[in-house]
Amino acid sequence: MRLFMAPNSFLPRTIAAASLAASFWILGAPGLAQSVVINEINPDPADKMKPTEFIEFHNPGAAAVDISGWVLDDAVDFVFPAGTTIPAGGYAVVAANPAVFQTAYGFAPLGPWTGNLSNQGERIRLRTGAGVLVDEVNYGAGFPWPTAAFGGGASMELIHPSLDNDLGGSWRAANPAPTSPPLIPASTSGWKYKLGTAEASTPVDAWRQWDYDDSTGWTTAPLPIGFGDIDGNAANTDVATTIASGTLM
């Protein structure tokens, strides 16, 4: 089975995952509600004359989170001011130099912080005002961490908020624009799949690119997507979107 994932509501971002069975295209990914996560880091901008370093935080949960008095420490130090709230599914950005950041990206972030993000990698910690650790990333500057995020003009972004963001394989290089959604959103709606016995695009990796147009030949449907009953229990429904048996054989 080959899985091609392209969440419609967050286009043009597309993600692929592969398996080993027959050849059809299907979209989907699990999502788990959780607390605020460190979601995107820009430690090494391409233009060394413009200090646009930033750290982005994402709230993947269904309720707003008040982060007043929360603290960034270790690599950089910053205290979130009173009244700071991240809405459900929303983002907050802290920048090294808010004025330079706003000129580059068009909106005002929080900040500035004290300290520096090392281009060689180091630890970023997010704590509550009471000192409880909320999230921690000890990022690196080489593989398996995204190498394009170090001097190549890209930031690095967490693929999905349920992944362990202390692992380099959980991150990908991203366009250097913060407050973008996770590469694989937690929502079960708005996904697309493509049926067929040939590659999903020409060239074969075109559908994985940021600017891929999936408006033709892809079907929108809610997750999970499959051939019907999976666990042998006819009393429940294993999939929300059923593909007719034999469609691709």
Image (tube, rainbow, N blue to C red):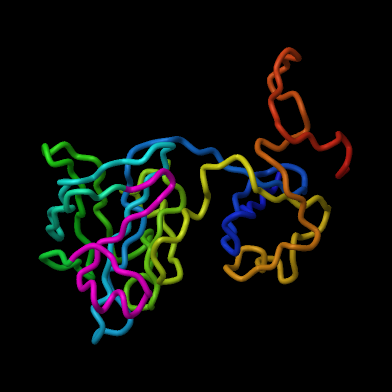
Residue range in magenta is 86-111
Tell me what residue is drawn at x 26 percent, y 79 percent: 100
Tell me what residue is drawn at x 64 percent, y 55 percent: 8
| Image quadrant assignment for residue 78 | bottom left
Percent from the top left, x then y, of residue 12? 60, 64
| Image quadrant assignment for residue 96 | bottom left
Q: Is residue 34 left or right of residue 185?
A: left
**236 up-or-down from 35: above or below:** above
Residue lying at the far front of the rendered structure? 83
- Asked whether 76 or 231 is in front, the reply is 76
- Asked whether 102 or 183 is in front, the reply is 102
Q: Is residue 4 left or right of residue 30?
A: right
Q: Is residue 170 left or right of residue 204?
A: left
**59 up-or-down from 180: above or below:** above
- Asked whether 89 or 85 is in front, the reply is 85
Residue 90 among those drawn in magenta = yes
Quarter placement of the N terminus: top right
Quarter placement of the C terminus: top right
Residue lying at the far bottom of the rendered structure? 49
Tell me what residue is drawn at x 19 percent, y 46 percent: 68
User: How many numbered discs sit on the rendered protein?
Assistant: 0
Q: Is residue 227 left or right of residue 16?
A: right
Percent from the top left, x then y, of residue 184? 52, 50
Residue 165 among those drawn in magenta = no
Percent from the top left, x then y, of residue 20? 67, 44
Percent from the top left, x then y, of residue 13? 56, 61
- Asked whether 54 or 174 is in front, the reply is 54
